[in-house]
Image (cartoon, coloured by chain):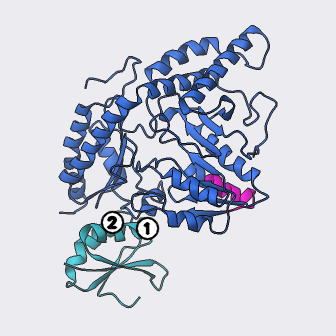
Chain colours: A cyan, B blue
Amino acid sequence: MTGADLELDCRGMRCPLPVIRLSQRIGDVEVGQTVAVAAEDTAARSDVPAWCRMRRHEYLGEDDSPDGTPRYLVRRLH
Amino acid sequence: MTNATGPSGAVTSGYLDAASSEPLHPAAREVLLSALDAGYADPLRLHHRGRDARLLLDNARAVVASCLGVREDEVSFTASGTQAVHLGVLGLLQGRSRVSTRLAHSAVEHSAVIRAGDWWTRHGRGTTAVAGVDHYGRVSPDGLAAALADGAGVLAVQSANHEVATLQPLDEVYAAASASDVPVFVDFAASAARVDLPPGWSAAAASAHKWGGPAGVGVLLVRKGARWRAPLPVDDRADSRISGFENVPAALAAAAALQARTAEREEVNARQFALVDRIRERVAGTVPDVEVVGDPVSRLPHLVTFSCLYVDGEALVTELDREGFGVASGSACTASTLTPSHVLEAMGALTHGNVRVSLTRDTTEAEVDRFLDVLPGVVSRLRERAGVR
């Protein structure tokens, strides 16, 4: 995955904090730009895509950070 | 609250967790008390106390068989629903191990099935294959085909999901399995006494405390003629599928509860189905950013699950308890549970902020309405506390 416009470091956070951070910071990027959520919490793997569906943003997929932490990439749609 | 105490004295008001354990049915309580006095002896002994116990156990078996539409010799009483699942799954695998050692199961099975599969891979040198589900949690034809593609010893699919209430298409499951000549194990714990179990299974399992019987009684069904082999040591008692002394009074009470629930099924199902419709509608309409999951129509009558964005599921359970409501949650936002519900994950549903509401047979409209009045405020308080909005 190429670089996101904004990366949120949610390492060490438990659900639902990574999704709360995402909702608070999505407005910091322009419509069409991307936010990456780096989180070890296994719930994020389900909850970031579910958040995108419920809040009508686009979920782009998952990759690994250099330190191995999963990153979940979202595109702001509105 | 009008139903704070039933005739049995159990306090059930605000208890909305019947899917974890239904309060003892009044009919079962009466039977249990008298059977405790009459059914203490060993049913294998030839003296008259033994024969009394034998009569009670045979009676329990006959009633359960008749309620479930199966033969008496197909019914065994186990020490729990989980044990019945383990014996059912592993016994069929054992019987088929010369053909295939793979256990295929749906992604949304109860953990009892999944743990049996883990055990089988470790101790039976077997493998597992998982059939995917759609967004309602229903096993899909493609998922079944993929799980059976490399052959399987057994296919395990539940009758209905215990977390989200979706009914599984057992006829399709049976057809897919029979095309591959694979026997089917059905965990029908969530649906027993509520929905008929259609024939087509080779083994099946349920749990009495889910229908208002006492805990500690599981029911294992093994179809006559099925290739089932005892996976664990057996003894020389009457029922060759289980080992140990049956809990005769509890088995009889379980049978009495099943009989009573079967007799009142239509009335209770209709009432519960309508109340759950109301919950589904009101929750979606009054709580912002909520996802009500599971099939809205083809479902169990008494159970509904929803997830609230930005809320910790455990905090939700605690706050609702403070308001007088006992509910379950499939969320895992605490250190005590490491992974969220595999059912919600498999469906692609939101796993945090999850609440499962399941109605007992005497949950009233007034209780449900009070729950629905209280819920939006509880959720919004928790969101404020978390710094959302």
Residue type pointed to by label 1: Asp
Q: Is residue B142 left or right of residue B134?
A: right
Q: CA distance from mark 1 to mark 2?
A: 10 Å
Q: Position of residue B353 (x, y in %)?
A: 33, 56
- Residue at which label 2 appears: A17
* Foreground residue among B156 and B304: B156
Q: Position of residue B352 (x, y in %)?
A: 36, 59
Instruction: Tell me the residue at 25%/26% (across/down).
Output: B1
The image quarter in which residue B226 lies: top right
In this rendering, the answer to whether B130 lies above or below B237 is below
Task: Kindly give the residue lying farthest to the top in the view shown.
Answer: B48
Q: Which residues are magenta?
A: B115-127
**Tags 1 and 2 touching, CB below 8 Å:** yes
In this rendering, the answer to whether A6 lies above or below B363 is below
Q: Position of residue B190 (x, y in %)?
A: 48, 42
Question: Same chain for marks 1 and 2?
Answer: yes
Any part of residue A70 in sight: yes
- Verify whether residue B319 appears in magenta: no
Describe the element under mark 2 as helix, strand or loop: helix
Residue type pointed to by label 2: Leu
* Foreground residue among A26 and B144: B144
What secondary structure is the magenta-colored segment mainly?
helix
Instruction: Tell me the residue at 39%/45% (across/down).
Output: B328
- Residue at which label 1 appears: A41
Q: Chain of mark 2?
A: A
